């Protein structure tokens, strides 16, 4: 009886938690791009090229789809969730391709936001690569619900750096510790939830979090390396 009564309670707790996390992610993205994109009229926003508009649409659709998918699972619309999941995997692939294309165009325009061109290029290449790895892992784990949804959330968190970098609050940029601390609070939040609800962190939460943190530690050494400067210069002159 204890197992039969406890299972729905745990399920609903998971549903509420992941819906709350997806809304937090949407909030981070909206605040970051409100001035330059969302409140600037979307397609009427003054962006440097149509490719940046496509990039913005794809990444916005991903966040909205994430919220819808979590809500569908909460409402027991699992069949709809699976059908939309096919679209989600296609969208993720397009995001990576368009993301790299947009990044290369930004390097060629020298469009670095408060950082060196090498840092912009290294940071975004790493974030897109980690996103691709985590989404592919989520695809492989699609029959394991708890692992799948955690990997999708972690994949989305890995892309939040550019949104947070555009927040209009000075404290965010007071130090790297504060900046990455805000991003990593999602990871800590998920690990803490796993420990509270399931008595231990889920394995994909641990490994996915380590991958994201490792990516963050790799950003500075990569951007300062001699060969990366040469590679960036080569891309810049394509």
Image (tube, grey):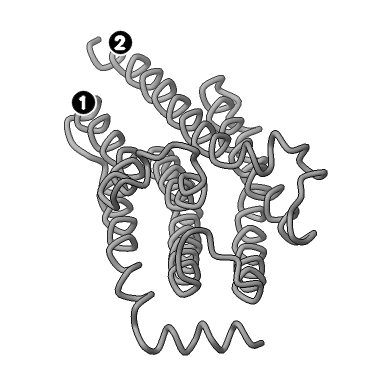
Quarter of the image holding residue 75? top right
Residue at the farthest left position? 199
Q: Camera-side residue: 3 or 213?
A: 213
Q: Position of residue 46 (x, y in %)?
A: 76, 50
Q: Which residue is mark 2?
A: 5
Note whether 120 is above or below 165 in the view shown. below
Q: Position of residue 173 (x, y in %)?
A: 36, 47
Q: Which residue is mark 1?
A: 196
Q: Is residue 194 left or right of residue 13?
A: left
The N terminus - image quarter = top left
Q: Is residue 49 left or right of residue 86?
A: right
Q: Position of residue 188 (x, y in %)?
A: 26, 38
Note whether 112 is above or below 47 in the view shown. below
Q: Secondary structure at mark 2?
A: helix
Q: Is residue 29 left or right of residue 181?
A: right
Q: Is residue 156 left or right of residue 221?
A: right
Quarter of the image holding residue 221? bottom left
Residue at the farthest right position? 44
> Along the polypeptide, which appears first: circle 1 or circle 2?
2
Quarter of the image holding residue 4? top left
Q: Residue at x 46, y 75 (%)?
A: 118
Q: Position of residue 98 (x, y in %)?
A: 67, 64
Q: Residue at x 64, y 76 (%)?
A: 108
Q: Residues within 10 Å of mark 2 (few under 14, many from 20)?
A: few
For the residues labelled 1 and 2, the Cα–Cα distance comes to: 18 Å
């Amino acid at each position: 009886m204890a197992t039969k009564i406890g299972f729905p309670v745990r399920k609903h707790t998971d549903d509420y938690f992941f819906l709350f996390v997806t809304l937090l992610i949407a909030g981070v993205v909206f605040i970051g791009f409100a001035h330059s994109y969302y409140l600037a009229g979307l397609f009427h926003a003054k962006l440097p090229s149509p490719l940046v508009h496509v990039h913005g649409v794809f990444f916005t659709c991903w966040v909205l789809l994430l919220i819808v998918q979590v809500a569908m699972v909460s409402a027991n619309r699992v069949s709809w969730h699976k059908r939309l999941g096919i679209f989600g995997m296609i969208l993720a692939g397009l995001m990576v391709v368009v993301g790299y294309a947009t990044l290369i165009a930004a390097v060629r325009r020298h469009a670095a936001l408060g950082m060196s061109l090498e840092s912009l290029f290294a940071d975004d290449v790493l974030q897109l690569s980690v996103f691709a790895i985590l989404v592919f892992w989520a695809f492989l784990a699609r029959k394991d619900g708890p692992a799948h949804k955690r990997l999708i959330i972690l994949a989305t968190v890995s892309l939040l750096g550019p949104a947070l970098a555009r927040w209009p609050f000075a404290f965010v940029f007071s130090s790297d510790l504060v900046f990455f601390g805000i991003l990593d609070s999602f990871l800590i939040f998920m690990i803490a939830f796993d420990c509270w609800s399931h008595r231990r962190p889920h394995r994909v939460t641990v490994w996915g979090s380590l991958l994201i943190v490792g990516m963050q530690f790799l950003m500075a050494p990569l951007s300062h390396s001699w060969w990366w400067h040469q590679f960036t210069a080569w891309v810049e002159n394509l």
